[in-house]
Amino acid sequence: MIFAAEVYGNSEFSFSHKEEIAKGELIEITDAAINAGFRFPVVMTRAVWLECIESIHDRENGISLQEKRSRLQNILSKIYSECRRYLWSSSFVCQISNHVNVKVVIGIVNNGDVVITIMLPYEN
């Protein structure tokens, strides 16, 4: 039996994902990710959300919930395809549009669970 820690290494996270979600720094998107094919919990940083799902322009002019869901599903589908390419990697960079790359980190959080974190390349 192969354990996640053997494949993905020890936790790179020095914080609790639950604390970061409560503060609004991470956004829980697991339900949408499951629809895209993921089998582990997925979170996205607020910076990626604001860059890709709900930009300043969108907030000024309004954006429908359906449009946000559609953008999120498109991004998750692209990332899921890349995850299948980099099956044994603990992190990789994925181009999700002509002007945006994201870093995908597959790691073990404090309680030992696998969590996939989507962030901008300069974020930790």
Image (cartoon, helix red, strand yellow):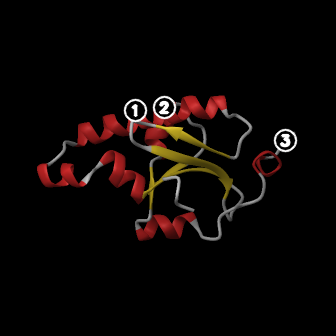
Q: How many numbered tags mark residues here? A: 3
Q: Is residue 9 above or below residue 73?
A: below
The answer to whether any part of residue 35 appears in the image is no
Q: Earlier in the sequence, mark 3 or mark 1?
A: 3
Task: Tell us which disc is closer to us: 3 or 1.
Answer: 1
Q: Amino acid at mark 3?
A: Ile
Please tell me which residue lies in front, 102 or 8: 102
Task: Tell us which disc is closer to us: 2 or 3.
Answer: 2
Label 2 crowd bin: few (<14), some (14–19), many (20+), radius 10 Å? some
The answer to whether any part of residue 31 appears in the image is yes
Examine the image and state in which quarter residue 73 appears.
Answer: top left
Q: CB under 8 Å between callouts 1 and 2? A: yes
Q: Dot 3 corresponds to which residue?
A: 2
Real-space CA distance between mark 2 and mark 3, rounded to the nearest whole angstrom: 27 Å
Residue at point 19%, 42% (across, down)? 64
View extreme (left): residue? 61
Q: Dot 1 corresponds to which residue?
A: 74
Real-space CA distance between mark 3 and mark 1, rounded to the nearest whole angstrom: 31 Å
Q: Amino acid at mark 1?
A: Asn
Q: Amino acid at mark 2?
A: Lys
Residue 88 x/y as whole percent: 74, 37
Q: Which structural element holds mark 3?
A: loop
Q: CB under 8 Å between callouts 2 and 3? A: no
Residue at point 40%, 58% (across, down)? 47
Label 1 crowd bin: few (<14), some (14–19), many (20+), radius 10 Å? some
Residue 100 x/y as whole percent: 42, 43
Mark sitting on residue 78: 2
